[in-house]
Amino acid sequence: MVQSRTHTCNDLRMEHVGQQVKLVGWMENVREVGQNLAFVVLRDFYGTTQVVIETEDMMAAVKGLNKESTISVEGAVRERDSKNPKLPTGDIEVVPSKIEVLGRCRHNELPFQINRSREADETQRLKYRYLDLRNPEVKNNIILRCNVVAALRAAMLAEGFLEITTPILTASSPEGARDYLVPSRKHPGKFYALPQAPQQFKQLLMASGFDRYFQIAPCFRDEDARGDRSPGEFYQLDMEMAFAGQDDVFAVLERVLPPIFAKYGKYSVASEAPFVRIPYLEAMDKYGSDKPDLRIDLTLTDATGPLASCGFPPFEGNTVKAIVVTDFQGTRKQIDKLCADVEVQAGEKAYWFRYDEKGEIVGGIAKFVQPIKDEVIKALDLTPGCFVGLTAGKLLTAQKTAGVLRSKLGAFCPGHMDAQRYEFCWIVDFPMYEIGEESGELEFCHNPFSMPNGGLEVLKKAAAGEVDPLTITAFQYDLVCNGVELSSGAVRNHDPEIMIEAFQLVRLGEEDVKAKFPAMYNAFTYGAPPHAGIAPGVDRMVMLLAGEDSIREIIPFPMNKNAQDVMMGAPSFVEQKQLDELNIMCTAKEEE
């Protein structure tokens, strides 16, 4: 059966009065006001239209129908007596001559009210996601996602990039997160892996002679969920450029992203090129984060000199960081709440005092600051009415805790945050190496395929003990918007000799590199071009544009926080026959 509707439920206006029309959609609501008088709200993908029941036959057609049944309505358009200026179709209504039931809803009670589904429990929303998506508010996020992806694709094609898809079934490789493994039926004991990112394939495309590559790439990582990270799978605008460096990558994204953010975003203002560039060490020292929200004008000040020996035990022998907020209006209760929130998020305490309008040090740790009042006022450049937030610990701990405190203070103090905009920045010059928290040994800090600043020479000096490896920086960069990391990227290490030297510092020799990355290593021995790339996260991008706090709000069918699809019942047990075909034995099973 074909429903040849003449209009959608958002089309009809005063100029259609007197016309015969046919609409189809979901019966959102029925309001009976008399024996043969009722008002029906008909909803489709595009909007809603009021249908007025005035005859016994038409009343019989809708009587007993449950909400969310799909129906076809044929009838005449007329002007409404009581207009609704809030609706695009609020000046008219349809008087039906025929109503046909197309799909009956067989449930008297819905799991939640469609138009208020966002107020429902998240588990219910995910279980009945097909109902949740009928909510125009939820649906609009998915439409936004479609529009943004289309705009990204058009912009990249205009920049001369080719859209090339890379394999989904590939080999497992050490890229930082857990792989999703797929057993091979034809090769017992062997496994494919779903790609954590198309990293190696896009670099191989550069070695293959392609100049500019991109794709809206699906990526798969077995990692825990967060507000800005969905478990299982996500999508990114993956791109790579041959014969290019850091500035080339920056220039492309600075042309592509601002117009899209300004057009589709909740806020109409977005940073213009060039974006601010902040070295990693400066970002940590000034903002306490490698993903700073530049809408906030607060910065960190080093207060170790005057405060480390003030007699307050948490400060002794530690780095002390301060954030000074002028014209602070918070109450003691609000300050305590703010400090408690910092401790929950950072795992470390925040401290405070105020320099009040009378020129006195009051509140918080005031009794420790009072004896060195003049020294602290001078060091922190305080003026009456200031609030001073403080953190302490080893350098990185003090910085990160202060970064959390800065974000909380910015959100709490409207005068210090210009929230209605998208503020981009590049974080550059990341450390090439770090000491692993678990291993206690030298490890790659981020992408092992990044080109080190100083090239082969600095690596050889590090191997000879002439340079501390922890001081080596890489041509690695992050793109940050409003405190959210959208992407990491790098100028790639395309020289096999430099690659071997870089891996030797983390105790992996030439044979290890050849074994772990055979295709890329071999390809680079045939003459590879210098190349660079990046991969902004599409999900995070759309989350920012929609003004949502949870990434699940902009994914059509998201998993829950435990990486479960409660609608489809995934992951699920499979039949023993399937396991036998794949030569798999389960050593443990989750209880049903």
Image: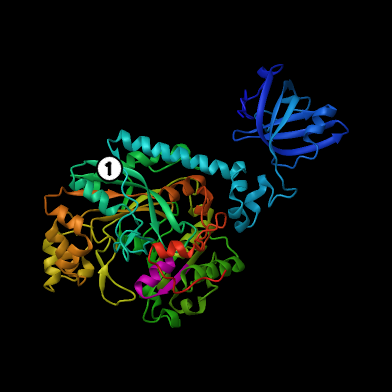
Picture coordinates of residue 568 (x, y %)?
55, 54
Picture coordinates of residue 288 (x, y %)?
39, 64
Q: Residue at x 15, y 59 (%)?
A: 454
**Which quadrant of the rendered structure holds the C terminus?**
bottom right
Picture coordinates of residue 553 (x, y %)?
53, 50
Of residue 412 and residue 549, the one placed in the foreground of this image is: 549
The answer to whether residue 520 of the structure is visible from this angle is yes
Q: Which residue is mark 1?
A: 213
User: Dot 1, how many residues are within 10 Å of its Cα: few (below 14), some (14-19), or many (20+)?
Assistant: many
Q: Residue at x 69, y 48 (%)?
A: 113
Of residue 99 and residue 338, the one placed in the foreground of this image is: 99
In this view, which residue lies farthest toward the right?
35
Q: How many marks?
A: 1
Q: Is residue 74 magenta?
A: no
Q: Is residue 393 magenta?
A: yes
Label 1 residue SS: strand
Going by the numbered disc 1, the residue's amino acid type is Tyr
Picture coordinates of residue 504 (x, y %)?
17, 69
Q: Residue at x 46, y 69 (%)?
A: 346
Q: Residue at x 24, y 61 (%)?
A: 448
Of residue 74 and residue 582, the one placed in the foreground of this image is: 582
* First to last magenta residue range: 389-402
Please tell me in which quadrant of the rendered image residue 183 appears.
Answer: bottom left
Question: Taking 579 as reference, is 43 above or below it?
Answer: above
The answer to whether residue 84 of the structure is visible from this angle is no
